[in-house]
């Protein structure tokens, strides 16, 4: 299983570019045999290369030319994080089905438990036809994915919700919002911010009190 992604983080003057290349060698059930992940962060490179043998996941970590090794106990099978979306399809999409298994998370460099549940087969105005609704929990975050009968993901909602700024038009596809949806976002680039002000002064407009969610917050 191979993958490649690139994204940019911009927040209050913080600007980072991150690129990831991943390659997982897996068994027929997506159990991890070996892997190599390469992260490029503003010109710096972090490479993780590992394999599971004799109940131990051994990982070589190379960062800025310096190497170290991890030996993580893994008596049971460890699965590829890149295959999380495919495992429910392989094991069976049936209402109420639940699956638990362990993956290696390259970003945190540790083993973590995945919990998945097939909720139901449903239709939505957000995609054509019907699909299985599958919820996935990993490291405290929940993702909801709708998978069609062919095992293809039709829609995914991650990070406990979706942020839609509406500042750019999509290059392809369709975007539909419900009638009661109201968009709101925080401008993370903060192009108009005053560098001489603190974060509180920027957000509050110089006031000592601001109201958030019906409560007053004091500086």
Image: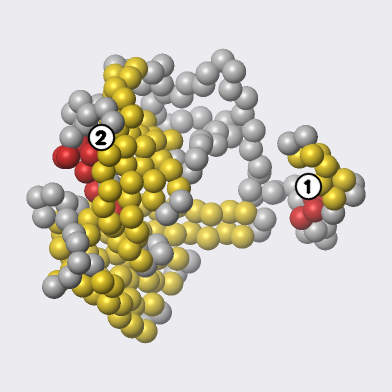
> Which quadrant would the C terminus be assigned to in this image?
bottom right
Could you say whether the residue bearing mark 2 is in a helix, strand or loop? loop
Characterize the local packing of mark 2: few (<14), some (14-19) or many (20 or more) Cα atoms within 10 angstroms. some
- Residue beneath label 2, please? 97
Label ID, residue 34 = none
- Distance between the Cα atoms at labels 2 and 1? 45 Å
Could you say whether the residue bearing mark 1 is in a helix, strand or loop? helix
Characterize the local packing of mark 1: few (<14), some (14-19) or many (20 or more) Cα atoms within 10 angstroms. few
Q: Residue 7 in the image: x percent, y percent?
A: 45, 52
Determine the residue positioned at 79% across, 39% down.
215
In the rendered structure, which disc, 2 or 1, sits on the residue that comes first in sequence?
Answer: 2
35 and 190: which one is in front?
35
38 versus 159 height, above or below: below
- Foreground label between 2 and 1: 2
Label ID, residue 203 = 1
48 and 123: which one is in front?
123
Determine the residue positioned at 85% across, 50% down.
218
């Amino acid at each position: 299983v191979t993958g490649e992604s690139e994204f940019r983080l911009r927040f209050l003057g913080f600007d980072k570019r991150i690129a990831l290349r991943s390659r997982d060698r897996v068994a027929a059930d997506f159990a991890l045999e070996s892997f190599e992940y390469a992260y490029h962060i503003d010109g710096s490179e972090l490479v993780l290369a590992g394999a599971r043998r004799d109940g131990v996941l051994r990982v070589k970590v190379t960062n800025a030319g310096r190497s170290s090794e991890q030996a993580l106990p893994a008596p049971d099978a460890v699965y590829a994080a890149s295959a999380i979306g495919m495992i429910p399809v392989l094991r069976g999409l049936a209402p109420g089905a639940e699956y638990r298994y362990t993956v290696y998370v390259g970003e945190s460099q540790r083993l973590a438990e995945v919990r998945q549940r097939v909720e139901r087969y449903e239709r939505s105005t957000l995609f054509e036809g019907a699909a299985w609704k599958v919820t996935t929990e990993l490291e405290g975050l929940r993702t909801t994915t709708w998978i069609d009968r062919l095992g293809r993901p039709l829609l995914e909602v991650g990070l406990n919700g979706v942020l839609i700024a509406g500042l750019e038009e999509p290059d392809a596809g369709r975007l539909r919002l419900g009638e009661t949806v109201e968009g709101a976002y925080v401008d993370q680039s903060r192009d108009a911010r005053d560098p001489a002000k603190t974060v509180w002064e920027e957000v509050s407009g110089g006031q000592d009190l601001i109201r958030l969610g019906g409560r007053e917050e004091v500086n």
